[in-house]
Amino acid sequence: MSGPSEQSLREGLLRIARQLVACGLNRGTSGNCSARHSEPDGFLITPSGIPVDDMSPESIVRMDFSGKVAGAGKPSSEWRFHRDILHQRAEVGAVIHVHSTFATALACLRRDLPPFHYMIAVAGGDSIRCAPYALFGTQELSDLALAALEGRKACLLANHGLITLGADLDDAMAIAVEVEALCEQYLIATRAGEPALLSAGQMSAVFRQFKDYGRQATLRSEAQATVRSKAQATVRSEAQTTVRSEAQATRQSE
Ligand SMILES: [Zn+2]
């Protein structure tokens, strides 16, 4: 099966890495993303320890499923779970991992996200599991993540963060945006009381409705709108800071 070219995947990974920072899902160098590359069989992954601003398409690292780097570069320290997910889940084309604030806060409570809201269905089931704790970068963490992801497109990692999966990068991004919002809503709701949960029957009805309405397409366009508006807000606040500091500089020089 021939998919997108290696160059377009490299550019896609860079674009998503930038969007993750722009919309506040990622800070510094903690997050990482990968995409399946079919010819030759393997995947592309963001590099280790390079801030997004310093990344170029050439910084993206190509690996095979044995974990060998093809060409140059040092892959993200979390390459094991990216490799294992892409190798074992044929329907997955891209993986995103972030330490976003609300998903990570919930992961620190080591709690599964229950069906408190119908949108939990975007992750493919009636819960989003939290994988038990294991040291970052280890095969143990990858094994625990894979188990928590069974039948799902998202899981939390205890005391660590979030993993989302998609058919492609935009799909995985849309799920990351939605799951982060769900974690925020759940944490706020639990502060005020005990959220009422939807029944198995109510969740089945949601899955049927999703199928009928092509929910994935809607979700993706909503997530892209969120990314755009958050990125604009960041640009605006940066512009205001610039305006303020320039005004101060003018006052000082006067
Ligand atoms: Zn991490």
Image: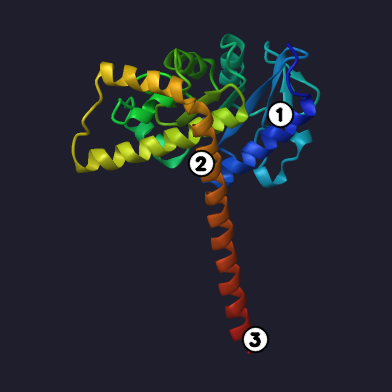
Q: Which mark is residue 25?
A: 2
Residue situated in front as seen by the camera: 96 or 181: 181
> Would you place residue 236 above or below residue 17 in this image?
below
Closer to the camera, 189 or 124? 124
Give the secondary structure at mark 2: loop
Nearer to us of marks 1 and 2 is 2
Q: CA distance from mark 2 to mark 3?
A: 39 Å
Badge 2: residue crowd in 10 Å (few <14, some 14–19, many ≥20): many
- How is the model colour-coded? rainbow
Task: Classify the position of the N terminus by image quarter.
Answer: top right
**Lower sequence index among marks 1 and 3:** 1
Q: Residue at x 43, y 37 (%)?
A: 180
Kindly identify which residue carries mark 1. 74
| Depth check, front residue: 179 or 103 | 179
Instruction: Determine the image quadrant of residue 152.
Output: top left
Identify the amino acid type marked 3. Answer: Ser
